[in-house]
Amino acid sequence: MRTEQDTDIPEATVAPEEFRAAMSRFPSGVVVVTTRCPDGTPRGFTASSFCSVSLDPPMVLVCVANSADSASSFAGCDRFAVSVLSPVHRPLAERFATKGADKFGCGGLRLSPGGLPTVERALSELDCVAHARHPAGDHTVLIGRVTGVRLGEGAPMVYYDRSFRTLS
């Protein structure tokens, strides 16, 4: 929302491909985010736009593409889970990033104590209660209050320059 103070700020003239190239230079972790529809159907997606928001209370945010197969499920979910991935999870990350893929039919998942699908051997798992949603261009920012944490071991998978990578 623009205010009178913003009138001196020019409109963005950055081409989408230029912005995408610039953001690809920023390394980030990789997560799989999951929920269940009211009828019990699991839904999920891969994200690199994930971060902590608050320590007290513990909160995280993840950005959901409005064009994602699961966008409507996350628009109305009460709970979701976040699994932080390691390099061994690359095939699963690719599967959850693929539109139209059978994301839950090929293994590599288990149920959290709260009944949400999570990634087996994830570096960490976070159980979240949906706290807020904010429209942001072609995405929705989903903020969750963390209600449970389980820790695994290993090194993180990193997304950099449009590719999954490992730290050396």
Image (cartoon, helix red, strand yellow):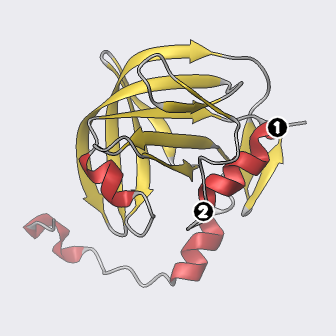
Residue assigned mark 1: 88
Residue assigned mark 2: 23
- Residue 52: x percent and y percent? 45, 31
- Left or right: 107 with respect to 49? right
Q: Please state which of residues 106 and 168 is positioned toward the viewer in this rendering.
A: 106
Considering every residue shown, the one lying at the far right of the view is 168
- Residue 2: x percent and y percent? 15, 68
Q: Please state which of residues 2 and 102 is positioned toward the viewer in this rendering.
A: 102
Residue at image point 44% right, 25% down: 115
Q: Say above or below: 17 vs 58.
A: below
Q: Are marks 2 and 1 in contact (CB under 8 Å)?
A: no
Judged by depth in the image, the label closer to the viewer, 2 or 1, is 1
Q: Say above or below: 50 vs 17.
A: above
Check disc 1: other Cα within 10 Å, few if <14, some if 14-19, many if 20+. some
| Element at label 1 | helix
* Quadrant of the snapshot with the N terminus: bottom left
- Left or right: 88 with respect to 108? right
Q: Amino acid at mark 1?
A: Val
* Quadrant of the snapshot with the C terminus: top right
- Residue 69: x percent and y percent? 45, 64
Residue at image point 72% right, 63% down: 162
Sequence-first disc among 2 and 1: 2
| Element at label 2 | helix
- Residue 27: x percent and y percent? 68, 49
Q: Amino acid at mark 2?
A: Met
Residue at image point 59% right, 71% down: 20
Residue at image point 60% right, 57% down: 102
Q: Please state which of residues 8 and 118 is positioned toward the viewer in this rendering.
A: 118
